[in-house]
Image (spheres, rainbow, N blue to C red):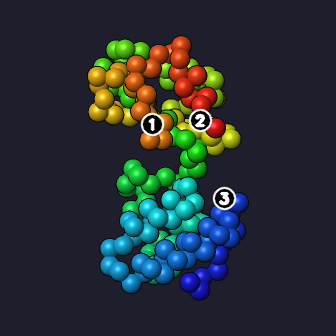
């Protein structure tokens, strides 16, 4: 790609090389912007403004189109995420069985609010309406690991396993 790479503290030279490969592979394919955004987010961890502008230029698309796609779909994030995403179910079964206290304990221990990321980017805390595991309530998922019957008393021991 021929565009000048912007400076960004979260994007290394190796990441820019991968981003260029993703753009070059897809730039002549109609409707590939979701693929490009997904793969670039996978490379960088999120989609900062500078990266979205760079993708727009590389794909020869208006910035507004790329921003529109990135902001519409919930799978995209324009803010940094933690190395580990903690999804806590706030559905009825989990709520009744104490998930709110679990969320409070996580927030107090790691200084993170719902929908936020810890300052050290170790964790992102995401409340979700359903994880499809009501029989395990209250339930949370960290990365690919599902944890059921999570109590406020044992949640910190579980979360501390993730470095």
Q: Quadrant of the C terminus?
A: top right
Q: Can I make out residue 38 in this image? A: yes
Q: Is residue 56 above or below residue 158?
A: below
Q: Secondary structure at mark 2?
A: loop
Q: Which residue is mark 3?
A: 10
**Who is closer to the viewer here, 63 or 97?**
97
Disc 1 marks which residue? Answer: 145
Q: Is residue 80 above or below residue 138?
A: below
Q: Earlier in the sequence, mark 2 or mark 3?
A: 3
Q: Residue at x 44, y 41 (%)?
A: 144
Where is residue 91 drawn, in percent x and y? 32, 26
Asked which secondary structure carries label 3, the reply is loop
For marks 2 and 1, give the CA distance: 11 Å
Residue marked by disc 2: 162
Q: Nearer the viewer, residue 117 or 43?
A: 43
The answer to whether residue 156 is left or right of residue 130 is right
How far across and how far down the image is residue 47, in percent?
A: 53, 59
Which residue occupies the foreground of this view, 2 or 148?
Answer: 148
Q: Residue at x 44, y 69 (%)?
A: 36
Q: Earlier in the sequence, mark 3 or mark 1?
A: 3
Closer to the observer: label 2 or label 3?
2
Report the Cα–Cα distance between label 3 and label 1.
Answer: 27 Å
**Mark 3 vs mark 1: in front:** 1
Q: Are marks 2 and 3 in contact (CB under 8 Å)?
A: no
């Amino acid at each position: 790609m021929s565009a000048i790479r912007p400076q960004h503290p979260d994007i290394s030279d190796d990441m820019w090389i991968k981003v260029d490969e993703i753009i070059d592979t897809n730039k002549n394919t109609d409707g590939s912007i979701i693929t490009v955004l997904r793969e670039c987010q996978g490379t960088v961890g999120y989609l900062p403004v500078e990266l979205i502008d760079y993708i727009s230029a590389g794909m020869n698309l208006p910035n507004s189109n790329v921003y529109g796609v990135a902001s519409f779909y919930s799978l995209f994030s324009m803010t940094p995420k933690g190395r580990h995403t903690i999804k806590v179910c706030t559905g009825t079964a989990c709520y009744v069985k104490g998930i709110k206290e679990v969320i409070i304990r996580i927030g107090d221990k790691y200084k993170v609010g719902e929908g936020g990321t810890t300052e050290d980017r170790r964790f992102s805390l995401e409340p979700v309406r359903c994880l499809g595991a009501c029989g395990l309530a209250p339930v949370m998922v960290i990365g690919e690991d599902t944890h059921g019957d999570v109590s406020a008393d044992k949640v910190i021991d579980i979360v501390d396993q993730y470095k």
